[in-house]
Image (cartoon, rainbow, N blue to C red):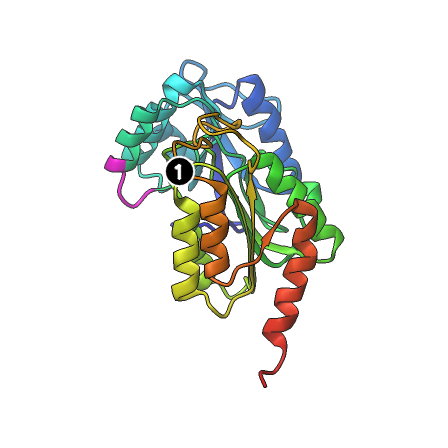
Amino acid sequence: MSIFLDKNSRVFVQGITGAEGSYHTGRMLAYGTNVVGGVTPGKGGQKTEHGLPVFNTIEECLAATGATHQCIFVPPAGAADALFEAYEAGVRFSVCITEGVPVHDMLRVVGTTPGMRIIGPNCPGLISPGKSSVGIMPGHVFKEGSVGLISRSGTLTYEVVDGLTRAGLGQSTCVGIGGDPIIGTTFVDCLREFKNDPQTSAVVICGEIGGSDEEDAAAFIKEHLAGMPVVAFIGGRNAPPGKSLGHAGAIISGGFGTPQSKIAAFEAAGVPVAERPSQIPALLSERMAASLSPRA
């Protein structure tokens, strides 16, 4: 399924009666997201504090509500089962907020759920400003517009978006893909969607050390998005080799996953890399203005 949300996106919350699930359900509802119910085994038939129905199984929830999008707030050991249950019930869009999901669990999920769009795990979710939000994004810093944003870090997403909004650069859709080694949706997956999105005219990429997703993104941009303004930022430049920086996937091993290799890849693709998040709005404005200028 497409990464883009709209007001027709019908969301159910896995773990809706837990403290985290309940809190963020309230925030999604306040933003205008169409949350239609939730699932907590053993608590079916109850109502949440928001007046939403609770079901024992995903199958029951879908039959009663017509939900299309899953948002997962369950302990790490149960996240894979929640994804498998959703897939078997027919869900094709899932946002897994849970941090600490075992890597081998995600390997099994990603390898055996074809056609299912999974955002995360260990992510803040996604938001299409002015339309819908699924996850834990602070909706008040977002503004509807034409800039797509993809980030491995949740807090960095909020910081960068706040800067964009203050600079008058609204966003089309912002996706927190997660910071784990194995995730369901990558930078390239999102870039492919933004390439064909009529609302998105520019993109910001917030990467970090570890893995090769940023290099893959740079290669895709060079080949397929040469005419679109894109700006990048790489977090964790000062992390010592072998040291994890917050996210399980943000670790340099030998010469692999270094900030230097990622910066070089973006620059080779014609993508300027900000040294600080605060530089992103100005850099992006320059790129957007240059893309509109007539060529000599």
Instruction: Looking at the picture, tell me which residue is in the foreground, 10 or 97.
Output: 97
Q: Amino acid at mark 1?
A: Gly
Furthest toward the bottom, the residue is 296
Furthest toward the right, the residue is 166
Of the 4 image quadrants, the one containing the C terminus is: bottom right
Residue numbers of the magenta segment: 111-116
241 in relation to 221, above or below: above
- Regarding residue 2, the answer to whether it shows in the image is no
23 in relation to 290, above or below: above
Q: At which x and y percent is residue 10?
A: 48, 42
Q: Hey, which quadrant is residue 77 in on the image?
A: top left
The 10 Å Cα crowd at callout 1, few under 14, some 14 to 19, many 20 or more, is: few
Residue with the mark numbered 1: 255
Q: Hey, which quadrant is residue 105 in on the image?
A: top left
Which residue is pictured at 59% across the width and 50% down the height?
131
Magenta span: helix, strand or loop, mainly?
loop
- Say what secondary structure mark 1 lies in: loop
Which residue is pictured at 42% across the width and 52% down the height?
217
Instruction: Looking at the picture, tell me which residue is in the foreground, 109 or 191.
Output: 191
Q: At which x and y percent is residue 249?
A: 43, 31
- Regarding residue 42, the answer to whether it shows in the image is yes
Furthest toward the top, the residue is 42
Q: How many numbered marks, from 0 up?
A: 1
Instruction: Looking at the picture, tell me which residue is in the foreground, 280 or 237.
Output: 237
Which residue is pictured at 45% across the width and 21% down the height?
74
Indicate yes or no whether the magenta region holds residue 114: yes
282 in relation to 152, above or below: below
Q: At which x and y percent is residue 222?
A: 42, 63
Q: At which x and y percent is residue 269?
A: 46, 61
Indicate yes or no whether the magenta region holds residue 286: no
